[in-house]
Image (cartoon, rainbow, N blue to C red):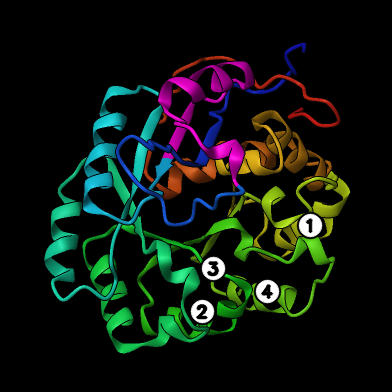
């Protein structure tokens, strides 16, 4: 692959996971996920980043425990390319204010998420204890990675009204039903959320929402184009979702599929979606680590 001509803007993966089966048992790891049945650590993603010229990464929790948070912070502090951690938090915890105060003292933790929220009822985020938890996140100035399924999307505008200062990024575009080919009601619900100008959206793990064995970039395109129309290039950020993405695609395919689905963009728009927006949202260092340029991929590239 020849390097693509582009600016020197940072390239940031806004959604990286690590899997360490020697230390944690992951509730979401189903027996049929055979491709994920081994460790996926920083040393394994490093060469992928070098090949694809990714400068920085945001490391997102994958096991809902304080023990994993400690582990991720240790890993991040030892890896130059990991610039931030999104840590586990239980929004319904009795001592949520104290938990948030402790997490906010870390220099590498920039955000939090309640991982099992996607398994909850449609109106779970409107519960009093959950709203209290979100207010505690907002109070310490950390961001919140919103992990939901389409059934939760209608309640999110009301949540944002009740916690107006909370800095939110919607993960995985709200998990659109790509495999079914349906757009409604996901499309209308996403548009309603995007009406709040402070909310951002991750273009991440879309291949796992499609038909794992038979997806194409064309399958993703209507959903990505709708998100682009709703949020604009200033509030979208790309994330690989590695290694979960391996259920449907390798790292390079995950990147190229988004490039193809987005279609032609200006250089400034491209730089924002693939780096600058994540840098600003998570308050990352503006200095890159690889100093390289994103290379062209089959069917798609950064210009």
Badge 2 crowding class, 10 Å Cα cut-off, few under 14, some 14 to 19, many 20 or more, is: many
Q: Nearer the viewer, mark 3 or mark 4?
A: 4
Identified at 36% across, 51% down, the residue is 63
Which residue is nearer to you in this view: 149 or 35? 35
User: What residue would you read off at disc 1?
Assistant: 225
Q: CA distance from mark 4 to mark 1?
A: 12 Å
Is 47 in the magenta?
yes
Which residue is nearer to you in this view: 273 or 187? 187
Q: CA distance from mark 1 to mark 3?
A: 18 Å
Which residue is nearer to you in this view: 79 or 209? 209
Earlier residue among tags 4 and 1: 4
For the question of whether residue 104 can be seen, the reply is yes
Residue extent of the magenta highlight: 33-58
Q: Secondary structure at mark 2?
A: helix
Badge 1 crowding class, 10 Å Cα cut-off, few under 14, some 14 to 19, many 20 or more, is: some
For the question of whether residue 239 can be seen, the reply is no
User: What residue would you read off at disc 3?
Assistant: 197
Is 259 in the magenta?
no
Query: x and y percent of residue 43 in the render?
Result: 43, 20
Q: Secondary structure at mark 3?
A: loop
Identified at 19% across, 61% down, the residue is 100
Q: Which mark is residue 191?
A: 4
User: What residue would you read off at disc 2?
Assistant: 156
Q: CA distance from mark 2 to mark 1?
A: 21 Å
Whether residue 10 sits left or right of residue 110 in the image: it is right
Q: Are marks 4 and 1 in contact (CB under 8 Å)?
A: no
Q: Secondary structure at mark 4?
A: helix
Earlier residue among tags 3 and 2: 2
């Amino acid at each position: 692959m020849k390097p693509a001509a582009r600016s020197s803007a940072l390239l940031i993966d806004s959604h990286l996971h690590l899997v360490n089966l020697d230390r944690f048992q992951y509730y979401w790891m189903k027996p049929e996920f055979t491709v994920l049945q081994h460790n996926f650590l920083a040393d394994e993603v490093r060469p992928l980043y070098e090949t694809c010229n990714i400068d920085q990464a945001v490391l997102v929790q994958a096991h809902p425990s304080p023990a994993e948070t400690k582990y991720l912070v240790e890993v991040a502090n030892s890896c130059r390319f990991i610039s931030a951690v999104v840590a586990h938090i239980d929004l319904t915890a009795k001592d949520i204010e104290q938990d948030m105060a402790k997490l906010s003292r870390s220099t590498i933790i920039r955000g939090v998420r309640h991982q099992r929220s996607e398994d909850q009822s449609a109106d779970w985020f409107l519960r009093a204890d959950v709203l209290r938890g979100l207010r505690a996140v907002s109070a310490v100035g950390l961001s919140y990675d919103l992990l939901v399924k389409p059934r939760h999307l209608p309640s999110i505008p009301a949540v944002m009204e009740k916690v107006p200062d909370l800095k939110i990024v919607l993960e995985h575009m709200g998990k659109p039903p790509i495999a079914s080919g349906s757009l409604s009601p996901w499309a209308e619900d996403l548009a309603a959320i995007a009406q709040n100008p402070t909310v951002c959206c991750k273009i991440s793990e879309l291949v796992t929402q499609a038909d794992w064995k038979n997806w194409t970039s064309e399958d993703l395109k209507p959903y990505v184009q709708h998100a682009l129309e709703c949020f604009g290039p200033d509030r979208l950020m790309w994330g690989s979702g590695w290694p979960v993405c391996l259920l449907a695609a390798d790292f390079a395919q995950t990147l190229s599929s988004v490039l193809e689905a987005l279609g032609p963009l200006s250089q400034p728009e491209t730089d924002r979606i693939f780096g600058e927006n994540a840098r600003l949202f998570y308050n990352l260092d503006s200095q890159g680590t690889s100093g390289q340029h994103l290379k062209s991929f089959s069917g798609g590239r950064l210009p």
